[in-house]
Image: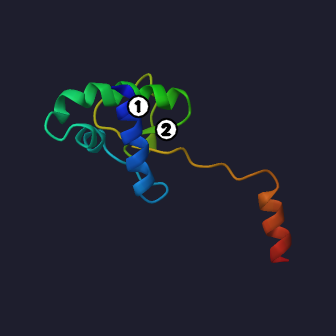
Amino acid sequence: MSAQVETAIFDLLAKVPAGKSISPEEVARAVDPEGWRRLLGHVRATAVGLARAGRLVITRHNKPADPDDFRGVYRLRLPESEPEPGAAQAQEEAGQ
């Protein structure tokens, strides 16, 4: 079940603009449109595992939340990509 949930999370995140998030409900509905409510616990558990591995960010009030200590309404997004070393310097030199 968690493989289906993980696939749904990354498929949905691929469809939204960078930096945007998805709701756990969207993920559960993608996996099982009829019985999505019973999947919300699986979505949360999978999201926590992915967040611990650094592959996903769990947000509350649009701010990253600790995957081991969050409650209530949350959303999921991809981690912000770090600029490659030297990229800022290359941009500065190109602008001069």
Identify the residue under disc 1. Answer: 47
Q: Quadrant of the N terminus?
A: top left
The first of marks 1 and 2 along the sequence is 1
What residue do we see at 54% from left, 44% from top? Answer: 79
Q: Residues under labels 1 and 2: Cα distance?
A: 7 Å
What residue do we see at 45% from left, 52% from top? Answer: 14
CB atoms of marks 1 and 2 within 8 Å? yes
Identify the residue under disc 2. Answer: 56
The amino acid type found where label 2 is placed reads: Leu
- Does 46 appear above or below 32? above
- Does residue 73 appear left or right of residue 53 in this picture? left
Give the image location of residue 19, x and y in percent. Answer: 48, 54
Residue closest to the eye, 95 or 81: 81
Give the image location of residue 56, x and y in percent. Answer: 49, 38
Color scheme of the displayed model:
rainbow
The amino acid type found where label 1 is placed reads: Ala
- Does 68 appear above or below 78? above
What kind of element bears circle 2? Answer: loop
Q: Residue 45, located in which quarter of the rendered image?
A: top left
Residue closest to the eye, 1 or 89: 1
What residue do we see at 40% from left, 29% from top? Answer: 3
What kind of element bears circle 1? Answer: helix
- Does residue 76 appear left or right of residue 89 in this picture? left
Give the image location of residue 53, x and y in percent. Answer: 55, 28
Give the image location of residue 25, x and y in percent. Answer: 25, 40
- Does 31 appear above or below 81? above
Q: Quadrant of the C terminus?
A: bottom right
- Does residue 54 appear left or right of residue 85 in this picture? left
Residue closest to the eye, 82 or 1: 1
